[in-house]
Amino acid sequence: MVVEKGSENLPRILVIDDELAIRRFLRTALSPADFVLHEAADGHAGLAAAVATRPDIILLDLGLPDLDGIEVLKRIREWSAVPIIVLSVRERESDKVGALDAGADDYLTKPFGVGELLARIRASLRRSLQQVPEPVFASGDLQVDLTLRRVTVGGNEVQLTPTEYDILRLLVTHAGKVLTHSQILKQVWGMAYLEQPHVLRVNISNLRRKIEADPSRPRHIITEPGVGYRLKGQPA
């Protein structure tokens, strides 16, 4: 299940936990005035939601009914650096070390207080935002501000979906170079989507409709037949 509340300008939090009581508690604790909350009740749903919602932070339980939380962690880390805080009843040091080694940014043992949870969320978000400002890419009428996540064509701002933006950002950072279908699928969707090139084709088509003057004759995103795609210009 996915719960969407509030403005898209607010931080997006994905909760992956099979306990309904915990999810209800977090709905109350994570005020809709401060966060946009998404939920998943098992590992597979959580992986799908991580791709679909592009959260700013993930709260992950280890004891999921279908996949162990460590496996979920590892799969997300194959394609994303999103901050992940583990929420678990497992108190052993070995469990904490295993989660942190698998890619978790923090570990909080259940039960926990709202104040401590919010403090850890704020700390994780601060760390994720403390990055060197990235440059602005410009090619013809297309401009992509990687710091502000702002895309304009001919001076007019273009609204992209999170997935469309992630594809464009990847192309921008490798502008002038060919990226294979597999490279894009792995970086944007994860290893599970390597055999689903139609997903990429659909999103490229949608992206072209938004940034190309004539999508049937693209000037920005060039198709390299049988290989992948290339963005004209120099990398940002």
Image (cartoon, helix red, strand yellow):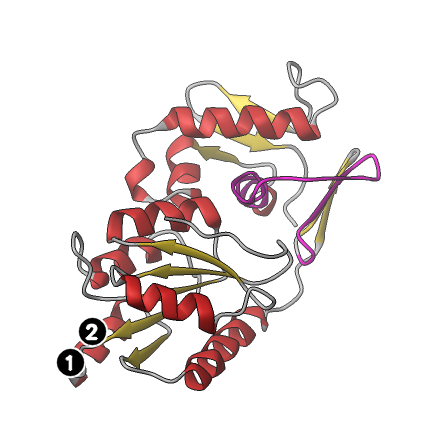
Q: Is residue 196 magenta?
A: no
Left or right of 182 on screen, residue 145: right
Q: Is residue 233 in view?
A: yes
Q: From the viewer's perspective, is residue 187 above or below residue 36? A: above
Residue 94 bears which disc, if any? 1
Residue 125 bears which disc, if any? none
- How far apart in space, not on screen, are marks 1 and 2 (Cα)? 6 Å
Left or right of 160 on screen, residue 84: left
Image: magenta residue range:
147-171
Q: Residue furthest top?
A: 216
The residue that appears at 26% across and 57% down in the rendered structure is 72
Residue 97, image x, y percentages: 22, 79
Kind of residue indicated by mark 2: Gly
Residue 92, image x, y percentages: 15, 83
User: How busy is the neighbourhood of tag 1: few (under 14 within 10 Å), some, or many (20 plus)?
Assistant: few
Q: Which residue is under mark 2?
A: 98
The residue that appears at 51% across and 30% down in the rendered structure is 203
Q: From the viewer's perspective, is residue 56 above or below residue 215? A: below
Q: Nearer the viewer, residue 121 or 102?
A: 121
Q: Secondary structure at mark 2?
A: helix
The residue that appears at 33% across and 83% down in the rendered structure is 112
Residue 8, image x, y percentages: 62, 53
Residue 179, image x, y percentages: 47, 35
Kind of residue indicated by mark 1: Ser
Q: Is residue 103 in view?
A: no
Q: Is residue 166 magenta?
A: yes
Q: Secondary structure at mark 1?
A: helix
Q: From the viewer's perspective, is residue 4 above or below residue 197? A: below
